[in-house]
Amino acid sequence: MKATLQFWQKIARQFHPAHILALSFLFLILVGTLLLALPVSKLDPNARLIDALFISTSATCVTGLAPLDISATYTFFGNVVILLLIQFGGLGIMTFSTFFAYILAGRLSMRGRDLIENSISSQPVPYLGRLLKFAVIGTLLIEGIGAVILTLRFSQDYRLGKALWLGIFHSVSAFCNAGFSPFNSNMMGYASDVTISLTVMVLIVLGGLGFWVLYDLFYWRPRGRKRLTLHSKIALGVSGWLILIGACLLLFFEGDNTMRGFDAGGKLLSSFFQSITARTAGFNSLPIDKLTNGALIVLIILMAIGASPGSTGGGIKTTTFAIIMASFFTRLRSKEQVRIFERGIPEQIVTKAIGISFFWVMAVSLAALLMAVTESSGPPDPLARNTMVEIVFEAFSALGTVGLSMGFTPRLSDGGKLIIILLMYIGRIGPVTLAISIASQKSLPVRYAEENVIVG
């Protein structure tokens, strides 16, 4: 083990941390593809390699989109491979490897610090070794507790062995915000089950808050000297409001539609479940293809915003959304400094948030444009409006690493699958890591003469 870690550390010194993170996810995707393509992994011998690549990418990037039923296509071994991809993809393979190196050596190298800061916190933080141990051990502990609760509930419907498997799979998938489920109808069979729904919702929220926020909450002392950081306050505040507003809007749009047969408690439970899972998890307790247009727009907005930085989820992130909104209202009031919770936000952070949001809009627009070509039925039959809605929804879901679909994923062409695969990969590593990875080198800090331009 120690020799293997030293070997990978030697290779890691040759690359920028952003390169290593991007390559580690690519490596995991390729390994997963090869394992899923093995005969021992397949129940269906005709399962295609591109579908194995799609599933491997979706699991590694904790998305949940699937062009086929994983329980009917892959053996138990294949499903274990998918579960491991979700686990390693959720935390990041470099997080695990750095954690074991830290345990063996008793300290973090400078390269290890750079890797963890890029993958967990995205900024320099004190007590990074403690944060690393908290992330790995805390993840396994939370998933373990979730697995026990879910196993006890599933044991009422299945034999103990299968109930244990379902409990572990759903717990890991929920905390990692993956959205994969061995059930072919996802969570719709348990839409009104309080125990399963609440457990899955709590796991999704904890996984989506980010390790830094969980760490901050764990050591928070309300009446002591340890206060929550501004980052944690924003992540918690935005997450709470998004869950509440999303649930209210979904209840309004779907109360007399897909929830028509539910009682008041079931409607409320399903509304909150779908609001929480839409932010990055991808589980669905309602038939997405039967939702009203208003509900679909709500889900798209939630998918775009996503989870918090340093979490297992995707999207532009809650803090980015908060800064964009704060910047908008600051400019609207002709103020100079962007402020949140009586704290000023540095201008470079505001610029970064705007850049991330612009990247998102451009990426989704380009992907939808390309898929409008690849998924078209040909010149004689122009692309139908409902198909275009499905394409846009699929693109948002893939880039946000959510996993919700209007049933369009199994109908994707090979070209469409490759586009979705690329979106899932970009959504997982993030636009900032992608930009650093493809940049050749830093340019000299040259400033040109400024000139006014009329805008607005």
Image (tube, rainbow, N blue to C red):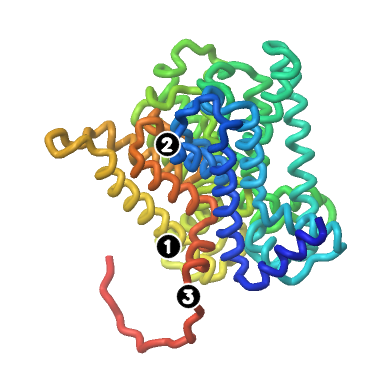
- The three-letter code of the residue at mark 1 reads Arg
Q: Position of residue 274 (x, y in %)?
A: 52, 29
Residue 214 higher or lower than 204, as above or below: below
Q: Position of residue 106 (x, y in %)?
A: 87, 62
Q: Nearer the viewer, mark 3 or mark 2?
A: 3
- Indicate the quadrant where residue 375 lies: top left
Q: Tell me the quadrant of the picture where the N terminus can be found.
A: bottom right
The residue singled out by tag 3 in the image is 440
Asked if residue 201 lies left or right of residue 220, the reply is: left
Q: Nearer the viewer, residue 101 or 435?
A: 101
Q: Position of residue 340 (x, y in %)?
A: 58, 59
Crowd band around label 2 with a 10 angstrom C-alpha radius: few (<14), some (14–19), many (20+): some
Asked if residue 203 lies left or right of residue 51, the reply is: right
Q: Secondary structure at mark 3?
A: loop
User: Residue at 63% across / 37% down in the picture?
Assistant: 81
Q: Secondary structure at mark 2?
A: helix
Alpha carbons under labels 1 and 3: distance apart: 40 Å
Instruction: Determine contact: label 1, label 2, CB under 8 Å.
Output: no
Q: Tell me the quadrant of the picture where the C terminus can be found.
A: bottom left
Q: Between disc 1 and disc 2, whose residue precedes?
A: 2
- The three-letter code of the residue at mark 3 reads Ser
Alpha carbons under labels 1 and 2: distance apart: 28 Å
Q: Is residue 131 visible?
A: yes
User: Residue at 26% across / 73% down in the picture?
Assistant: 454
Q: Nearer the viewer, mark 1 or mark 2?
A: 2
Crowd band around label 1 with a 10 angstrom C-alpha radius: few (<14), some (14–19), many (20+): few
The residue singled out by tag 1 in the image is 333
Alpha carbons under labels 3 and 2: distance apart: 39 Å
Q: Position of residue 131 (x, y in %)?
A: 77, 56
Q: Nearer the viewer, mark 1 or mark 3?
A: 3
Q: Which mark is residue 298?
A: 2
